[in-house]
Image (spheres, rainbow, N blue to C red):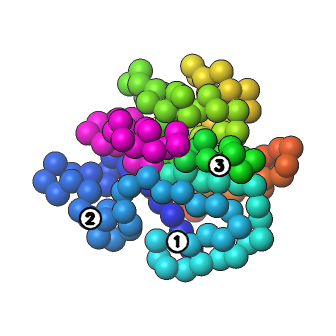
Amino acid sequence: PYRAVPGNHDRSNLVDFTNYTTYVGPTAVWESGSEVVTGYNGLTATTGWSGLDFIGLNNTNGGYNVVSATDVALVDELANQASLRYENIFVVAHHPHVYNLLIPLAQTLNNPDVVGYMHGHSGSTKAISGLSGIQNPNVWELNSQSIQAKGAILYYEVYPSQIVVYPIQLAV
């Protein structure tokens, strides 16, 4: 099963996100627990893992790192619900959390149960502790950069007290 978030190359002024929604999946905010994962492709995997919650969103609504007010509220609500279930949270988006001086998810990212912000788009492939402008000491920036251009994939092993990340360079 797979889940994906749209990026700026998925949007066109002529067709908006039509190609993305036709060939990949909805651009709306999505949530997936770790115990049972159902992908856009209809496949389901029962992992038996508990305690992780993934929240994916389109942060390319009208510009780089632009999130609608409705989506910001929904992401924050989903994060709050995951916190009440004592789950660690990974936020998944295309653009870095701060891009063009915008941090639309500041409230969510300051939630201490958010342990990862997974993105691509720019920068270098990395997994580092902390996010600029965010006070949450538990959050990691997990950047795959550009899979298409750099061939980088981040492979994660998540444990109760740590995240182990292996950057994998694909042959391109």
Q: Secondary structure at mark 3?
A: helix
Residue 6 forms part of the magenta stretch: no
Q: Amino acid at mark 2?
A: Asn
Name the residue at 21% across, 53% down.
16
Up-down relation of residue 157 to residue 76 (above or below): below
| Residues shaded magenta | 57-77
Viewer-nearest of discs 3 and 2: 3
Along the polypeptide, which appears first: circle 2 or circle 1? 2
Please give the residue where the numbered disc 2 appears in the rendered image.
Answer: 19
Furthest residue toward bottom: 43
Tell me where residue 24 sits by quadrant.
Answer: bottom left
Check residue 61 for magenta coloring: yes
Give the residue type at disc 3.
Ala
Residue at 59%, 43% (x, y): give it.
79
- Disc 1 marks a residue whose amino acid type is Gly
Residue 128 visible somewhere in the drawing: no
In percent of width and height, residue 47 lies at 73, 72
- The mark total stands at 3
